[in-house]
Image: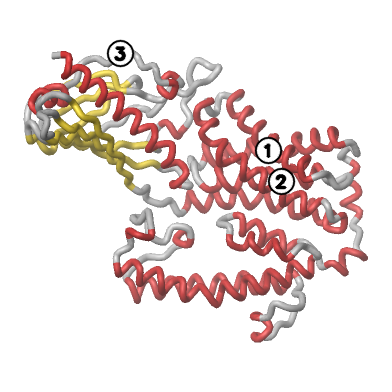
Amino acid sequence: MKIRFSELWRLNGTVDRGTYALVGVLGFALKHNIDRLVAAYGFHRGWRLFSYWLPLRDVARITDLRSNQAAFLGTMVAIALPFVWVGVAMTIRRLRSAGLPSQLVVLFFFPFVNLVFFLLLCLIPERAARLIEQPTSVSSFKQMIPESALGSAAVSLIFTVPLGLAIALLGAQVLTNYGWGLFVALPFALGLAAAVIHGQPQPRSIKSCIGVACLSTALLGAALLALAFEGMVCLVMAMPIALPLAAFGGACGYLVQRRPSIQAGAPAFLSVLLIFVPGVQWTEHAMARAAATFVVRSTIDVQASPQQVWDQVIAFSEIPPPQEWIFRAGIAYPIRAEMMGRGAGAERHCVFSTGAFVEPIEVWEAPHRLKFSVTSNPAPMEEWTPYSHIEPPHLHGFLMSKGGQFLLTPLPNGGTRLEGTTWYQHGLWPAAYWRLWSDAIIHRIHMRVLIHIRDATQKK
């Protein structure tokens, strides 16, 4: 295992798996320590492992960057460039050594997926060595799997679904993580494993590999529902991110299983997948991040004066049962609001289908602005399930309202523009994906209240 410094930058040639692993581990250790020192002493910021995926927690878009944040990110990118070049060069040479398409180097840039990719490249032997070595353990592994496509698909599901269920329960029930490990690493690894096992007897088509990969993830969801660990609504919300990742894993598995020489290492790197996903989950648990605060604003125009609207805002009357499918499916919905006292320091209770939000009043500017904090949150939903009741951990403490506000603005025509705002946090990752759901749900809750206030005011 010899490599010169100048060879780290070359794109031509090959590199063995031991050298690739050593350069990868040492390179990451060196870069991480440089990043920590620059962040701490140059910009007075902390820098942890998850900072590579979320360097600035309070910035949603690049256009929101302040000058000091832009300088920080620019510096970190500049430091990363030589390491990125070495990583890409070494990966291309390692792919060539393993007899894999060099185009797979794009996986180097996919968060979390690149960790699986790195592990696989550290395990797959060199092409020349594979032509000679034929471990007897591979033939015994193959003997367990039927030759027929249907039979190998069934065996792959028998292997992967129970294993995926155990890993999912470890993350959700034991470590109480609903993040990258559960929603990204698990479906990708599950799809990859299912496709590789499916192709052990003989190479399968890409359509077949992707199909069995997606089926393994779908059956995992069905198992979580059948065993009363999750409800239907949450599984439906997770599928748009889980199924494409499972399909991507299946496509990667197709590239592996269509090369018979690589199949000799299949049991080895499949066992590593058993370590990778729980490893991501444990890392998330050990390095728990503070949830970001998001804001949702909704508006409606009311043909009434601010004073008339204000009377409904502070304590609106009973709202009729919902017709929207999202509320009928189990998402908590507002029913009425009750006010205890008047002015700042009073307490408002917004009663939902799952309980009441307790809202101490912070600002009472009648009839223009009512602002309140939230000291108690009910469950965000009642899970749709074949059982009478289930209590998955994400129903408590993962979607939390932090405060709200009603703003009443007079209009030139004598009406009022009523704006409702909610500040909230959720402990689900990838945060950007789950925010699509939470923002939409909170907007529907806003509109249910605002429409009721408008209709109740205009009837008077």
Residue located 35% across and 49% down the image: 292
Horizontal side of residue 344 vs 407, given as left or right: left
Identity of the residue furthest to the front in this view: 413
Work out how far the residue at label 2 is from the one at label 3, CA to CA, in angstroms.
47 Å
Residue located 33% across and 37% down the image: 400
Q: Are marks 1 and 3 in contact (CB under 8 Å)?
A: no
Label 1 environment density (alpha carbons within 10 Å; few <14, some 14–19, many ≥20): many
Q: Quadrant of residue 117?
A: bottom right
What element does badge 1 sit on?
Answer: helix
Q: Position of residue 54 (x, y in %)?
A: 44, 57
The quadrant of the picture occupied by the N terminus is bottom right
Q: Earlier in the sequence, mark 1 or mark 3?
A: 1
Residue 214's label in the rendered image is 1
Work out how far the residue at label 2 is from the one at label 1, CA to CA, in angstroms.
8 Å
Name the amino acid, label 1. Cys
Q: Which residue is mark 3?
A: 320
Front disc: 2 or 3: 3
Front disc: 1 or 3: 3
Q: Earlier in the sequence, mark 2 or mark 1?
A: 1
Q: Is residue 132 above or below residue 6?
A: above
Label 3 environment density (alpha carbons within 10 Å; few <14, some 14–19, many ≥20): few
Residue located 26% across and 28% down the image: 357
Residue 250's label in the rendered image is 2
Q: Position of residue 403 (x, y in %)?
A: 24, 38
Horizontal side of residue 151 vs 378, given as left or right: right
Q: Are marks 2 and 1 in contact (CB under 8 Å)?
A: yes
The quadrant of the picture occupied by the C terminus is top left
Horizontal side of residue 235 vs 125, given as left or right: left
Q: Position of residue 182 (x, y in %)?
A: 55, 43
Q: Earlier in the sequence, mark 2 or mark 3?
A: 2
Name the amino acid, label 2. Gly
